[in-house]
Amino acid sequence: MMVELRRGVGFRGGAIVAGLVIWSSCQMAEQPSPPTMQVEAGGLVAVVPESNPLSAEKVELGRWFFYDRRLSADESLSCASCHVPERAFSEPAQGAVGLGGERHPLNSPTLTNVVFQPRLNWADRQLRELEDQIAGPLFGSSPIVEMGLVSEELREQALRRLSQEPQYQELWRQAYGEQEWSWERVIASLASFVRTLVSEDSPWDRYQRGEELALSAQARRGAELFFSHENGITCHHCHGGFTFTSVARHAENPFDEVAFFNVGLYNLDEEGAYPAQAPGLYGQSGDPGDHGKFRAPTLRNLRYTGPYMHDGSIATLREVLEHYQEGGRAIEGGALAGDGRRNPNKDGAVNGMRLSEAQLDDLEAFLEALNDPGFGDNPAFSNPAPPESRHWGE
């Protein structure tokens, strides 16, 4: 993606470039502040915090930071290690492995269109902004140590490494002028880049824009099923709109209330319990009725984002459909034994579907039509450093 920003005295205009509507608001000055940007996709204009307005300069700096392994304590992990571009910025394993070798109990979700998500992480009512979310993997130690900057000393060392990198001198000046290096600004840059990770060029998107041949006959049949209530189908109740989630936050809908759902994956004690390391909203609220409740993820780019569910416990997309066909999952033996179909906290919409194999094929074809092959390969989102670079990579 080439970002074009027109600059001038009193100019107010825009250019639509790969899902971004970029508005310049520069005024004549000796040192004008970077022009601001808007992110638009699917007819939605994203909400961006006033405390961190988007600019092309911050986005570019954040792109370099996203791939820089020096953001981790031992310089071995970057943000892209757990949000792999070729996997639609998701994790291709059940859970990411942090610096200490521990595996995270939750699957790293895709960053596809994350700018429109009203809540971040899998089960957190409070976490609304990317700036707050990004600090968790960088500085946190629970449930595992991820990037490992868990002490002030380690954070100071990492910030010093970044500030001494020659590549960043001009990039920082363009984004922040003469303002000093700080973690607040590093994180603001990362958040700015992540907000531009827009995907809106799937066959379904092209079909919606009038390209009749973009969608196969099978995918069209699947779409009719998906948006129906036929034979117990309730998919679109939790996965609707442009984002194919429960709700999208945007300029015309700035409210950020969001529902969380239990879909019957577990029932360890016949009273609704989920594994202790990933109990859903219960871990935050302590309310037994919140056991197993997680936010509904986007259905975009599913080809690249498996394994599926909050804990990556379902390997294939067909198995996900079969899970909903059965109205939940029964595990017969082992530590996770229990009948999730009978979980008392299970959402009422997950009652099983009565679809033939052919109809499941059609539904799967529609979900495949939500894949955007160019998203992970978009040059605007790629590692900006040469392949032989020591410090940048996945």
Image (cartoon, grey):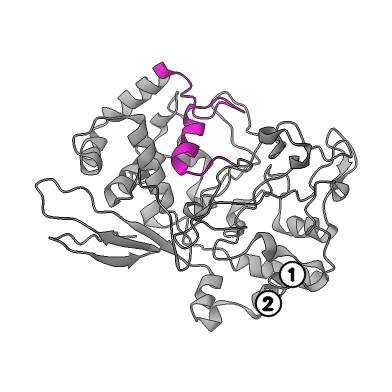
Place of residue 349 in the rendered image (x, y in percent of width and height, measured from the top left): 78, 59
Q: Nearer the viewer, residue 187 or 199?
A: 187
Q: Is residue 314 magenta?
A: no
Q: Which mark is residue 361?
A: 1
Kindly report the distance in space between the C-alpha atoms of the residues bearing marks 2 and 1.
Answer: 8 Å
Quarter-of-image position of residue 203: bottom right
Give the amino acid at mark 2: Gln
**Mark 2 in CB contact with mark 1 (< 8 angstroms):** yes
Any part of residue 387 in sight? no
Q: Nearer the viewer, residue 256 or 26?
A: 256
**338 relative position to 281: left or right:** right
Q: Is residue 69 above or below residue 217?
A: above
Q: Is residue 127 above or below residue 367?
A: above
Quarter-of-image position of residue 196: bottom left
Place of residue 321 in the rendered image (x, y in percent of width and height, measured from the top left): 75, 60
* Label 2 SS: helix
- The magenta stretch is 126-153
Q: Which mark is residue 218?
A: 2
Place of residue 265 in the rendered image (x, y in percent of width and height, measured from the top left): 79, 46
**72 relative position to 142: left or right:** left
Which residue does the image show at 76% across and 51% down from the upper left?
263
Give the amino acid at mark 1: Asp
Which residue does the image show at 70% across and 39% down from the upper left?
280
Within-10-Å neighbours for mark 2: few <14, some 14–19, many 20+: some
- Extreme residue in the top direction: 153
* Label 1 SS: helix
Quick one: quadrant of the N terminus? bottom left
Q: Nearer the viewer, residue 354 or 125?
A: 125
Place of residue 129 in the rendered image (x, y in percent of width and height, measured from the top left): 47, 43
Any part of residue 92 in sight? yes
**347 relative position to 102: left or right:** right
